[in-house]
Amino acid sequence: MPKQSEYVTYLLELLALLGQVTSRAMFGGQPFSYSKKDGTVAVMSYWTVPADLLEDQEPLLVWARKARDTALKHKAPPKRSKKTKP
């Protein structure tokens, strides 16, 4: 496993009061896009933390709690597994 950067360690320390927070590298740090069946390209949107929040833990935690709560509220239901016919 690659060593965690000092920046990621710093962010995890700021967010520690939220409970168990982990990090993972996704898509090599690049936006993720894919071709859809209709031929169009879909680009996944991921939001970044406003820079001014990275210097003060309290407003960062408020922002992070709102983001987490919104994500949980709009979480997609689990996909049903396809049953195979015998």
Image (cartoon, rainbow, N blue to C red):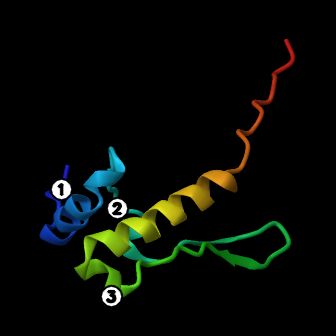
Q: Nearer the viewer, residue 41 or 26?
A: 26
Mark 1 → mark 3, Cα distance in angstroms: 28 Å
What label sits on residue 2 in the rendered view? Answer: 1
The amino acid marked with disc number 1 is Pro
Binning the other alpha carbons within 10 Å of mark 2 as few (below 14), some (14 to 19) or many (20 upward) gives: few
Mark 1 → mark 2, Cα distance in angstroms: 10 Å
Q: Residue at x 52, y 58 (%)?
A: 68
- Against 73, is 20 above or below? above
Measured as percent of width and height from the top left, residue 32 is found at: 54, 72
Task: Please identify, in this view, whether the residue under mark 2 or under mark 3 is nearer the observer.
Answer: 3
Measured as percent of width and height from the top left, residue 63 is found at: 45, 71
Q: Residue at x 74, y 39 (%)?
A: 79
Determine whether the residue tagged by mark 1 lies in a helix, strand or loop: loop
Labelled pair 1, 2 in contact (Cβ < 8 Å): yes
Whichever of labels 1 and 2 marks the residue nearer the N terminus, that label is 1
Mark 2 → mark 3, Cα distance in angstroms: 23 Å
What label sits on residue 52 in the rendered view? Answer: 3
Quarter where residue 14 is shown: bottom left
Determine whether the residue tagged by mark 3 lies in a helix, strand or loop: helix
Residue under label 2 = 25
The amino acid marked with disc number 2 is Ala
Q: Residue at x 32, y 44 (%)?
A: 20
Quarter where residue 12 is shown: bottom left
Tally the marks: 3
- Against 84, is 16 above or below? below
Q: Is residue 6 left or right of residue 52?
A: left
Measured as percent of width and height from the top left, residue 11 is found at: 25, 66
